[in-house]
Amino acid sequence: MVNRLENIGLNIRKYRKQMKLSQVELAVEVGIDRAYLSEIENGRTNPSINVLYALADALKIEIEKLFTTELKL
């Protein structure tokens, strides 16, 4: 079962890949370290709300999309 932080990370990775951005490119856009972005995408750290808003802005999505879960049947 995927926990909340892993879910957020998976969503960030999904939207980043849809935009064809590398971790480095997204991290630079947001103003965070690439290693920190990797930790977020892998659900190993709890990003601040400011970082989540910056990521959503850079990914051109509403922040709510970072919290959605898709049921896999």
Image (tube, grey):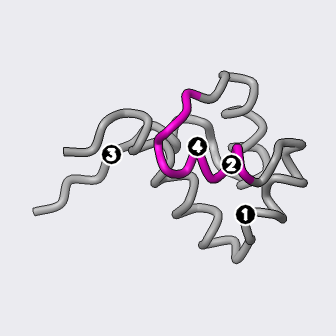
For this rendering, which residue is in front, 46 or 69?
46
Q: Amino acid at mark 2?
A: Leu
Query: Which comes sooner in the sequence, label 2 or label 3?
Result: 2
Which residue: 62% across, 41% down?
62
The kind of residue on which mark 1 rests is: Gln
Say whether marks 1 and 3 touch (CB < 8 Å). no
Query: How many angstroms separate mark 1 from mark 2 (CA)?
Result: 7 Å
Disc 3 designates what residue?
69
Question: Which mark, by number, is residue 15?
Answer: none
Question: Does the magenta segment cover residue 55?
Answer: no
Q: Are marks 2 and 4 in contact (CB under 8 Å)?
A: yes
Separation (CA) of disc 1 from disc 3: 22 Å
Instruction: Say which residue appears at 69% left-offset and 71% top-offset.
Output: 19
Marks 1/2 in contact by CB < 8 Å: the verdict is: yes
Front: mark 4 or 3? 4
Mark 1 crowdedness (10 Å alpha carbons): few <14, some 14-19, many ≥20: some
Residue at 74% across, 71% down: 21
Mark 4 vs 3, N-terminal side:
4
Q: CA distance from mark 2 to mark 4?
A: 5 Å
Rendering coords of residue 60 (x, y %):
73, 53
Q: Position of residue 58 (x, y in %)?
A: 79, 51
Q: CA distance from mark 1 to mark 4?
A: 11 Å
**Residue 43 is one of the magenta-drawn residues:** yes
Q: Nearer the viewer, residue 2 or 20?
A: 2
The residue range painted magenta reads 35-46
State which tag comes first along the sequence, 1 or 2.
1
Residue at the disc numbered 2: 37
Disc 4 marks which amino acid? Answer: Ile
Q: Which residue in the structure is indicated by mark 1?
A: 23
Left or right side of 54 for 31 = right
Secondary element at tag 3: loop
Q: Is residue 56 shown left or right of residue 70?
A: right
